Each structure stands twice: as structure tokens, then as C-alpha cells.
Image (spheres, helix red, strand yellow):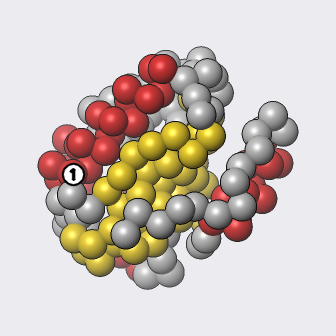
Amino acid sequence: MPYRVSWLVEERVVLQEFWGHLNAAELSGAVQEFAALMDAGTPPIHLISDAHAVESYPKSIGTYMKSFNYRPDPQRIGWLVVILPDSPVARFIGNTVPQVGIVGMRFRIVANYDEVVTFLAHQDETLTLPESIPSPY
């Protein structure tokens, strides 16, 4: 299972971490776990999706559409901030999937966790993020 979903900031910021070779079942599982946390959190709930260590992605946009079957309550959602490596495939997926996948979430693509902290601090002054993300691997 090359992913982990957990609270980074209890009830406010969800952290999804992906690594290795990602498939549709794992994407779907990560979305379901995010949905459960989203429903239990305190709005606005932000999502950090760290995909910088993914080695391969599903090739079909249809795969992503089927995996992202969750429609969050617009009153509960904050920002989706995606950490992606600097590659054409990753950037294409990162720019396309949030627009057609999790409807209603505002999103931003960044290169590293430092950029996440800077960005979310400007968007939500009520948050205090940890200085680093504990490694899942």
C-alpha cells in the first residue's frame, strides 16, 4: 500500500502521502480515507497531497475520475495543496485531476513542504503547521 492518510493538524489538515507505483485501487482507498476524516473534522479542512515520491501513476484520466467519487460539502472544504515533482506527467495530472476530480476544492501545486507552510499560512491564519512531515517510509 504505497499511501498513508492521516491528520497532520488534528481535525483541520489532512495529509495524504503517496509513493512508489500508484494504482486505481490505492487512489480510491486514499479518497475514501480522506472523506472519512473530512466528515469528522472542523471546517475549513485543508488537504495536503504529497506525491513527490510517486514513481508511476495510472495513465488514464478515466481512472482518476472513477477514483474521485467523493463530493465534499462546500461549507467544510478549504484548500487542496499538492506537492509534486517537477515532471511533465506529474504536472499534467496535478493540474487536470483536481479540476475534474474533487469538485469544489480550490487547489495549488507546490514543489515542497516549505511552500505548503507558506501558502496555507497566508490562506488560513488560524493554522499552525508542523515544521516538517514525518516520513512514511
Which residue does the image show at 65% across and 27% down from the upper left?
44
Given residues 70 and 45, the one toward you in this image is 45
Q: Is residue 54 above or below residue 81?
A: below
- The quarter of the rendered structure image containing the N terminus is bottom left
Q: Badge 1 is on which residue?
A: 26
Q: Quadrant of residue 41?
A: top right
Residue 40 image position (x, y, % from top left):
48, 20
Disc 1 on helix, strand or loop? helix
Which residue does the image show at 37% across and 69% down from the upper left?
137
Does residue 94 appear anywhere in the picture?
Answer: no
Residue 117 lies left or right of residue 10; in this view the side is right
Given residues 129 and 75, the one toward you in this image is 129
> Furthest-bottom residue in view?
87
Residue 80 image position (x, y, % from top left):
55, 46
Residue 45 lies left or right of residue 95; in this view the side is right
Which residue does the image show at 39% across and 46% down from the upper left?
5
Does residue 125 appear anywhere in the picture?
Answer: yes
Q: Quadrant of residue 110?
A: bottom right
Q: Residues within 10 Å of mark 1 (few under 14, many from 20)?
A: some
Residue 113 image position (x, y, % from top left):
63, 65
Question: What's the residue type where badge 1 is placed?
Answer: Glu
Residue 118 image position (x, y, % from top left):
78, 59
Which residue does the image show at 67% across and 59% down from the upper left?
116
Q: Is residue 35 above or below residue 136?
A: above
Q: Is residue 111 above or below residue 16?
A: below
Q: How many marks?
A: 1
Residue 8 lies left or right of residue 103; in this view the side is right
